[in-house]
Image (spheres, coloured by chain):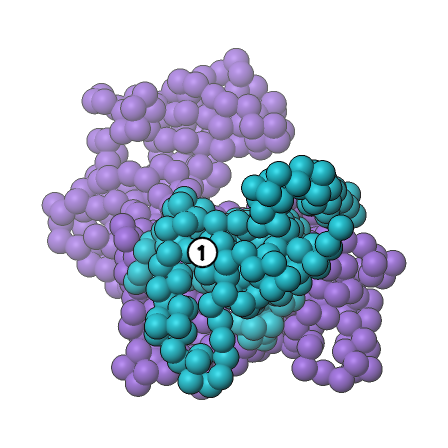
Amino acid sequence: MLALAVTKRLPGFTLAVEWRAAEPVVALFGPSGAGKTLTLQCLSGLLRPDSGRIVLNERVFFDGAAGVNLPPPARRLGYVFQGYALFPHLTVAENIAFGLKGLPRGRRLERTAAVIDRLGLGGLERRYPRELSGGQQQRVALGRALAVDPDLLLLDEPLSALDAPLRRQLREELGHTLREWGKAAVLVTHDLEEAYQLADRIVVYESGRVLQAAPKSELLWQPTSAEVARLIGIRNLLHGTVVKATPEIVQLEWRGQTLEAVNSPSRSFLPRPGTGLTFFVRPEYARLIRKDRSGPDPGRHMNMMEGEIVSELDQGTTWLLFFRLSAPGPPSQGTYDLEIEVPKLVYEILEIDRDRHWQLSVHRGSIQVLPA
Amino acid sequence: MDLFPLALSLQVALTATAFTLLLGIPLAWLLARRRFPGRDLLEAVVVLPLILPPTVLGYYLLLIIGARGPVGRALAAVGVELAFTWRAAVVAACVGSIALLIKAAQAGFETVDQRLEQAARTLGRSEWSVFWSVTLPLAWRAVLAGTVLAFCRALGEFGITLMVAGSIPGRTQTLPLAIYDRVQANQMGEANALALIAIALVALLVFGVSRLARLRF
């Protein structure tokens, strides 16, 4: 259990964050300059917060009111720095053994050899960091942090130094290592996919504040604000007006259509009719209705809409279609109303390149309303 | 030819360099790594010996370490004579050369990525250990270059030495002072020999060290 509440004032930037996590791996997600690394530095003891409290499994690292501030060595953490910060003047083995200075020589060598072996770095012991590939450097950095058997690993953008194909592979490898070593970790990243794949809980940062902290699937499906929705890259973020709200459904009016969305049971959000409301429709959940089958079935197809595809974007394996409703009035997102994503196969079968006029439906479970 | 000035100069320069390292490295580290009130002032004071006239420096130094100065009296109380002894020449050489070491070492320490030092701290190392195992090993070339420069400067120190140690043949007359003395006495042959020795010594040292350690000055 990790609980953190800190404030830190710097020239031109103030960090004021609070979150807690019982899950093993937590990702701090947000744009650069949001205060994620600063949080890691407070957590590690490299930076002293102005006030607050940091507790890991009942061990108090920092308590501003009580004047407690454990120095970094006493916190028993493993810090993997952005860009790895390997010691350039030391070999792989010396880097990994760096934190084991207090051990007798025999135990130190034994432990170093075990870490090297477990991370698949055998044969590289005498190499220097500059002679290693990006992936090997990452493993050495991990090994150096893991060698001291820390209670918590801090990972600052552990994959950002790598290029795309390697990054994917190492993301899986890193996830595997974290599970295999059974280490709790706090991961800093600006890549949502990385956060989602590696972490159990995601804390969303912006401008030195926490916007939302939630288990990862909850965050993805129930962002609590338009700000979070934008940061996690949610598209089709739209504004409508409430027609009716019950604990089960929210009926709303948008672009002359009446749409029905499932009300989240956990929130029992009941806005009054006539109030404005932000909602979103995931591009991959809008369904084009096939014309070669019998007409639309009102039981299966709800939230029917009709319009034109005004432009499109080939994304390789999927197509992004920009859909404009036939309803009068200006489109809600500039030149279009909805972004729709379809797999390439669907695009080809439906011959979307020739046929631009479509009906589509969105299941009420795929329209998410955001609390005001 | 009397080689005493050469021996004295080597003795003075070596001793002075040892003291310069002892005092200069902590100061260089402080200037490179710590922010404290008075830091800017300290940084300015450190370079003063490079820009003030040596005789001015020597004059004030004499006021401090002379028989009637505060340091001079304190040392006299414990039976140590400083002014106009070879020890005063050491002090003069230190004052004249320490700025070269501090500036070079400070620049060297500043080029060390601070995240490496932070990494060492999170791996359980004390500040002392961080310095010896990370900062210094990564900045040693700069420190060595500064040390060589400081040593050469100490070897050639003239103005301050003359003011505080005098030019007493057989006692405080270092190599540069001896050369001046020989020229004054019109003994050009001996002046020439001593000058060549000085050049050879410095050239050998600078090229030798830079060759061995692949330094750049």
Residue at x 72% of width, y 83% of height? A103
Relative to B140, is A79 above or below? below
Q: Which residue is mark 1?
A: B163
Asked if residue A84 can be seen in this view, the reply is no
Q: In the picture, which quadrant includes the C terminus of chain B?
A: top right
Give A157 or B139, whichever is nearer the viewer: B139
- Name the residue at the top extreme: A354
Residue at the location (61% across, 50% down)?
B178
Of residues A269 and B31, the one nearer the viewer is B31
x and y, in percent, of residue A286 in the image: 44, 37
Depth order, front residue of B6/A153: B6
Q: Chain of mark 1?
A: B
- State whether residue A246 is above or below residue A61: above
Residue A309 in which image quadrant: top left
Q: Is residue B17 left or right of residue A44?
A: right
Element assignment for label 1: helix
The three-letter amino acid code for the residue at tag 1 is: Met
